[in-house]
Amino acid sequence: MNTVPKLVLFDLDGTIYVSGNLITGVKDLLQRLTDLSVSFGFMTNNSSVNPDDYFTKLSKMGLPVTPKNIVTSCEATVRMLNELNIERDLFIVGTERFKNYLAQNNYFHNETNPNAVLIGFDLELTFEKLTKAVRFLENGVPLVASHPDVCCPSSAGPIPDAGMILAALKAGSNVSPLAIAGKPYKWILDVAKEKFKITNNNEIFIAGDRLATDIMMGNKFGIKCALVLTGVSKLADVDASEHKPDYVLNSIPELLDTNLFKSL
Ligand SMILES: [Mg+2]
């Protein structure tokens, strides 16, 4: 017997929109969830921009969002840093937007004596930043990251993401991250659960386009999940993967056709 979820957590890129274009039927899907009193959140690992930027972007697309509906690895990073008791000075390999968000939450970029090296989705990465980061790691400064994605897809091809920077630093220093905040790790899920006052994982449903983050997260935390085939992972990848979705959907509006919602 399936329980109707109280909260559906949607991935964004590849799930709700592709190359900035909203997937057909998303607005109707969200309206139907609202009619059924099912809450929804948008959960993204992208730490190159702020949660406010996503709020603006999704509002402009005409989606019915409030800041509460947006859950990003930026918020998860702050939660992780707080819970790990990492003090406020960090060497941040990330965008100025990421640094600004962290500063608003009392974590500051420090180039001389940081308590940790923090890796984000750094679209402003430089040789100098990598050099400083690897030297801090050599000196025993711990490493943390906003999320693990190696590449971010784009219409022009893959864009190097936080995971690629982590791999480069691992190659240079043999240091692995002490903790990672975003999907598929617990901090981003805890941010969502706190926002929506959900305590039980079986009241949540996850939908996303990546087996190695969205679906792995569902499997790891006992949360039912759907893979959508509009993004990174393809049907042929499912059999080969250790991460198993409960549902495979051609496109996200098919969620309403699953037995989770059909009987309603
Ligand atoms: Mg995605």
Image: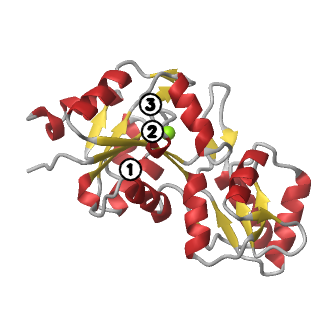
**Front residue of 1 and 244:** 1
88 vs 83, left or right, is: right
Decide: few, some or many residues near mark 2? Use Cα within 10 Å; few <14, some 14-19, many ≥20: some
Whether residue 242 is visible: no
Residue 233 marker: 2
Query: Does the residue at mark 1 contact the one at mark 2 (Cβ under 8 Å)?
Result: yes
> In the structure shown, which secondary structural element does the residue marked by tag 1 occupy?
helix
Residue depicted at x 62% and y 69%:
81
Q: Is mark 1 within 8 Å of ligand 1?
A: no
Residue 54 or residue 17, whichever sits in front: 54
Tell me how far mark 2 sits from mark 3, CA to CA.
Answer: 15 Å
Residue drawn at the location 43% of the way across and 22% of the way down: 23
State if disc 3 and disc 2 touch (CB < 8 Å). no
- Label 1 crowd bin: few (<14), some (14–19), many (20+), radius 10 Å: many
Residue 186 seen: yes
Q: Amino acid at mark 1?
A: Ile
